[in-house]
Image: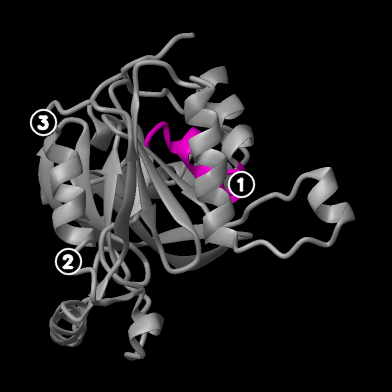
Amino acid sequence: MTFNKASGGSLLERLRLYRYWATREFDLVIDGESTRISCTAGSNESVSEAEERCAEKAVRVQQIVDHQIKRESSYERPIREEILEEIDDDNVITRNYYGAQILNTSALSIFDIDTYQKTFWEKLTFKKIDNKTAIIGLLRQLYEQRVLPGTTWRIYETTKGIRLIVTGQYIDPESPVFSQFCRQINADNLYATLCRHQKCYRARLTPKPFRMKIKGIKYRCPIPKGEESAYREWVATYERESCNYSVCRLVETLGNLTSDNQIVELHDRFCCRDESLTLA
């Protein structure tokens, strides 16, 4: 069984996350008429470089319109999330589209499991099963079978299901091991696909706004001009209310690996505020 450390540059480069953004308008000629378009581009070096990329993007659009070049089928849009903290080359905290803080990591293997898949006999007997209890039972069974030897599994309860953090080895999301393990634990398909596509894992560190019953927001990056104050006010309310909730709570640890892991500690500091708090 092979475990691989992520490679190929920093996480920012692999995710196409940018520190600086710029939006500029340009005039294009379409069907003989001048049309104004808006181009947004990012850079990890400076705002001026982002502006240069906006201009380059506009030139490419005009060339596509004029059939001088073909649209790139392999083009991947950058992740439009605000960078809150760059911990190191493999760990970055961002704010997603609904305002929650997200850990993006290519140093720690994290899985979301929302649904227990009943066995044939469980379906046949119409046996009632508690979803979270059943997921934990399955994880215990798989761990005893040494599915991932030499690892320790940290099992957390979330609002809907279970979050699993595997320490001791890093599982490359592009590897067959990852795909097989996701099938074995019945990991959320959408989440697994996202991990595979982005070549990293993502874990929500702060509650979902609707679960705290606060007004939602479509958190755009870069923040639109003139809306900075409204965004700051929303974030202040969100962060204040977040203190009354936890994202998850540690239920059980399988294995005895005790080596310090700063990213696990960061995860727990954000997510496991107090066992008495409501999960959100």
Asked if 173 appears above or below 218 in the picture, the reply is above
Identify the mark at residue 85; answer none if there is no mark: none
Q: Which residues are magenta?
A: 186-200
Nearest the viewer among 137 and 270 is 137
Q: Quadrant of residue 60?
A: top left
Q: Which comes sooner in the sequence, label 1 or label 3?
A: 1
Q: Amino acid under label 2?
A: Arg
Image spot of residue 67 (x, y percent)? 63, 39
Whether 187 is among the magenta residues is: yes
Q: Which residue is mark 3?
A: 260
Whether 122 is among the magenta residues is: no
Asked if 81 appears above or below 108 in the picture, the reply is below
Q: Amino acid under label 3?
A: Asp
Q: Which comes sooner in the sequence, label 2 or label 1?
A: 1
Please, what is the dominant secondary structure of the magenta stretch?
helix
Neighbourhood count class around disc 3 (C-alpha, 10 Å): few under 14, some 14–19, many 20 upward: few
